[in-house]
Amino acid sequence: MRELLVLASEELRGPLTSVSGYLQVLLDGEVGELGAGQARVAAIAARNAERMERLVDDLIVVAQLHAGAPADEAVDMAALLRERVRDAAPAAEGKGVRLGAGTEPCPAVCGDPLSLGQAVDYLLEHAIGFSMPGGTVEALACAVDGTVVVEVRDEGLPVEPGEVGELFAGRSAPAAAGPRAMLGSRLGLYLVRLVAEAHGGRAEAECGADGSTRLRMVLPARASAEVGRLSA
């Protein structure tokens, strides 16, 4: 099944790349100027093709994590977080959300920088997506008792205590669930949990007394990391 998932994802990548390329040709006016309505439709299609390409990449990462241990590289999570916050800044600015990063000197994490980066992307994307204009998203990387903690805090729609487990579950939320569990990317936060567990760590969510939501990955520092296989 894992091999089929990787094969199907790789087969999808080619056609999607072609579709994205031709849509960009249309948007660039290389085959004639588009009317306002045509350009709007083409831009929507291009954004959705980009989302599909990202989904394919995520499926490959999920399949690889299930297949075995991630790569054994020394990853500076503080530097990685700062890089991903810079990449997410335009999306935050577009929503009128203040995005900041605070990092402390951290030991390296033993693992795969690609999958760790994707997990951080999803933490930031989720926080920005549920923030209101004028809100604040704060990202933090720090060392705590032999672990490296990457946390993203936002002031958006709150998570009810009973819904915390649903965020990382990777399944359809109950009908009575709140908007975080119902509308959030099930694959995105599921991937966060898979990445954390594949690196010997865990994913956590916390509802602050002030109504804030904190999503985090807790990863063992390189000296004590035991990178293993996923159990499920």
Image: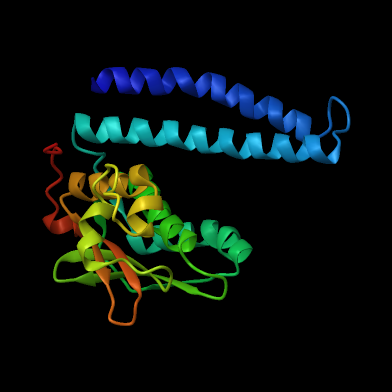
Residue 58, horizontal then vertical, whole percent: 38, 37
* Residue 89 placement, left or right of 3: right
Q: Residue 114 appears at what percent x and percent y?
A: 38, 43
Q: Name the residue at 70% across, 25% down.
A: 22
Q: Is residue 184 visible?
A: no
Number of numbered markers: 0
Residue name at image x 47 percent, y 37 percent:
54
Residue 73: percent from left, percent from top: 28, 46
From the viewer's side, name the closer residue of 34 and 162. Answer: 162
Image coordinates for residue 153, horizontal then vertical, percent: 37, 70
Q: Quadrant of residue 19?
A: top right
| Image quadrant in which the C terminus is located | top left
Residue displayed at 22% across by 67% down:
161
- 144 over 3 or under it: above or below: below
Q: Is residue 182 above or below residue 156?
A: above
Quadrant assignment, res 214:
bottom left
Q: Is 97 on the left-hand or right-hand side of 71?
A: right
